[in-house]
Amino acid sequence: GAGVSQTPSNKVTEKGKYVELRCDPISGHTALYWYRQSLGQGPEFLIYFQGTGAADDSGLPNDRFFAVRPEGSVSTLKIQRTERGDSAVYLCASSLRQGARDTQYFGPGTRLTVL
Amino acid sequence: KNQVEQSPQSLIILEGKNCTLQCNYTVSPFSNLRWYKQDTGRGPVSLTIMTFSENTKSNGRYTATLDADTKQSSLHITASQLSDSASYICVVSANSNYQLIWGAGTKLIIKP
């Protein structure tokens, strides 16, 4: 595809459930980022992958959050024991390389609602 | 502390009018500044990127300016269209750092 895609576009779940959010980056982009965006706020950094490895996961709020990128392309963000405070739009972005000058291209996001 | 502040928080203007959005930052060391447009329910899309040595950058009806001395940037939109209704987010990168420091955005509404 031409851009970053994310599935599902919307996810409604109950408190305590497990969810997986998927990101397909632009083909050939080695860097992949996950962000979380609450209403009226800018995106909040969660985790960054360079290839298959998580180069920086300092933004993950707690150990209920985990992300993988096993083949260096598609990534999955996993949230265990969801809480109402996890409700937000989860954005994925990719860039050709990592670095301050590389533009990050964003997907449309997954809107997660925890009831 | 690295921060990006934007003003106004929201803005309503009539179609065809011009407007200017402001961004102040305290990010050091500075690498570049981007303006992103985010439509409701969509991911952010990059409009412009400026490095330390660039004072102005245009993208169609969008013109961004940067004053690295005062650490201020502005985004000017000319002859606004209904499709310009969106949030405009100022984002600053520190040197050699992929992490972006995001402003909270300005919500722009264009009315016919």
Image (cartoon, helix red, strand yellow):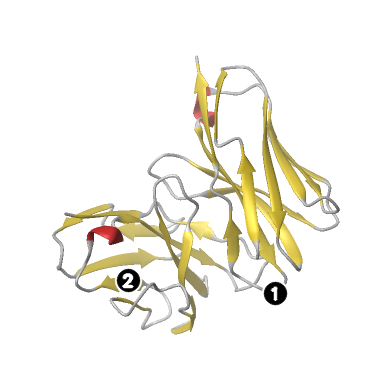
Q: Position of residue B46 (x, y in %)?
A: 59, 50
**Residue occupying image coordinates x 55% and y 44%:** B105
Residue B45 as seen in the image, left or right of residue B75: left
Instruction: Identify whether A82 is placed above or below A37.
Output: below
Residue A17 as seen in the image, left or right of residue A67: left
Q: What residue is disc 2 on?
A: A77
Q: Position of residue A72 (x, y in %)?
A: 43, 80
* Amino acid bearing label 1: Ser
**Residue occupying image coordinates x 68% and y 34%:** B60
Closer to the camera, B26 or B46? B26
Instruction: Identify whether B58 is placed above or below A106.
Output: above
Instruction: Identify whether B7 is placed above or below B112.
Output: below
Residue B60 as seen in the image, left or right of residue A16: right
- Which residue appears farthest toward the front when viewing the image? B1
Instruction: Identify whether A32 is placed above or below A7.
Output: below
Q: Which mark, residue B96?
A: 1
Q: Position of residue A28 (x, y in %)?
A: 51, 71
